[in-house]
Image (cartoon, rainbow, N blue to C red):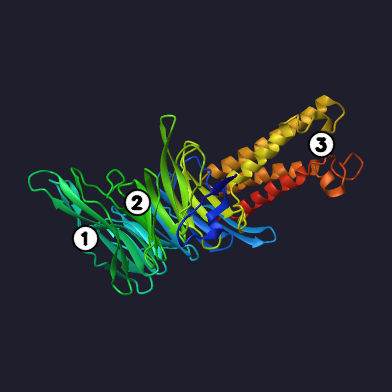
Amino acid sequence: MAITIMVFALWYGSGVNSVHAASSIQFRENQLTLNDADQQNPDIYEYGLNNYAVVWQDYRNGIWDIYMFYQNYLGNATWDVQWDTRITANSGSNLNPKIYNDLIVYQSNRKGNWDIYTYNITSKVETQITNNTADQQFPAIDGNIIVWQDYRNAWWDVFHNYVTGLDVYMYNLTAKTEQSLPFSEQNAFNPAISGNRVVYTGINYYPNPYSDLVQTNSYVYSYDLSTGLKTDVAAGSIIWQSEIGLTDSVFPQVNFPAIDGTLVAYTNDGTNNIAAKDLSTNATWQSNSQYVLHPDVSGDWIVYQNYYGYNYNTYWNIKLAYFSTGITYQATNTLGQQQNPALSTKYADYIVYQDYRSGHWHIYLTSFWYSAGGGSPPQEPITPSQAISNLQQINSMIGNASQIPTSDFAGANNKVKENRRNTMINQLDSAIANIEAAANTQNLKTRSKYLQNAIDQLNDLIPKVDGWSLRGSADVAGSGFTPDWITAPLYLDQMISSCRNDLQTLLNGIS
């Protein structure tokens, strides 16, 4: 599905990129997962143009596992696609995946506490990074460095109800060494990394000795691993709280930092806006949203989830901002819940996020590009949901008597013609049902069987509608070809063949 958002703006001051000052941007949305369970917290990495992997946490096995979608367009209508690839299979929960190159990093509690693990996509080898008995959570990775939030030195102040002693640790994959980063705040958490720069949230507490109130000072910091230099990115307002926490229910004034290169974004003023700062130029930007969360950064782009109300209900959607101009775009326009976006703009422009529109959390991917000022859309992903959507459109065409009247069908009489219409509709329905069954089964052999059933249904349909496309007229009895059931030149065989080829690609990607 593609939506076009026209944005026209007049901007004053220096530093405005004229290409983006008044332009039209297009978003094309695709559903990556179809299984009737929850999929959450996606991340994306691009290897090249139309070549990327998306990872997420998935509850389809009754426990959280890490799954992956991989796609590479090889040219000449040839694809390498691995869909719904299960990465973890253990007795614990596996959460918060991040991906860099061929390495996925995540947290797992299979041994009774949260530890950090990696999985190498190429070698298919899983490695335990931490083995401390305390919890290590929320990993991030860039290059050969992994960082995470670590509880090994933390303790709980019972009277004031807050934790202190949270640290940020790092692991060097090349040297195979672990160390705590030398941060002086009482709590350092929510780290992100880009190159040699680590950004994190730091909090200091100052309890009132006569009450349970605690003064809270929060900061976002940048730390350079190569020089040891720490830089203040943002300082939150001093606030007094009766309860202190580090979850989404109690927010520090500045939090959730994200970084790419020298651009840092974070939630500001509680959650009243997203702010960003370029560490090299000190240029800043902030959104005008009232309630926002979970920014991500790639290149000059910032993505975040935005809270809004409609008909007395509350929802989240995804917004996208271009730092150099400050122009903000609405990346999703479906009423509902779109959350936890991740962003990549290395070769093409992609946003991945979780969406609850079907009653389960599914992973969606939206590509975006400028329809004015250059740029072209990347190749669409091949997914079960996309195949179903395409077949539903074909089914709708065949079932619509105003679009394909009875007179366009071959047959001795109208009853025969309508029977052929209904038979084609039933075959398409059967193919769709088989694709849905393939997406919802855990058994790869059974999944292959369902996909092959769908392919067989489409292979049976194609010769019945191929005459106009191949020979310029409908095939009839005695022509040496399968007689066509639809005699109008609709090129349905090409549409059905495209769906069949996509299903074959999905079948080839089962591993």
Instruction: Name the amino acid, label 2.
Output: Thr
Separation of marks 3 and 2 at Cα, in angstroms? 59 Å
Instruction: Name the amino acid, label 3.
Output: Trp
Residue at the disc numbered 2:
267
**Quadrant of the image occupied by residue 312:** top left
Residue 291 spot, x, y in % from top left: 37, 43
CB within 8 Å, label 3 to label 2: no
Dot in front, 3 or 2:
2
Instruction: Name the amino acid, label 1.
Output: Glu
In which quadrant of the rendered image does the C terminus lie?
bottom right
Local SS, label 3: loop
Local SS, label 1: loop
Q: Earlier in the sequence, mark 1 or mark 2?
A: 1
Of residues 23 and 142, which is closer to you in this image? 23
Residue at the disc numbered 3:
485
Per the rendering, the mark at residue 185 is: 1
Determine the residue located farthest toward the front in the rendered image: 12
Taking the spot 86% from the left edge, 41% from the top edge, the residue there is 474
Q: Within 10 angstroms of label 1, few (less than 14), some, or many (20 or more) residues?
A: some
Separation of marks 1 and 2 at Cα, in angstroms? 19 Å
Residue 86 can be seen in this image? no
- Left of 403 or right of it: where is 208? left
Residue 416 spot, x, y in % from top left: 82, 28
Count of numbered tags = 3
Of residues 202 and 101, which is closer to you in this image? 202
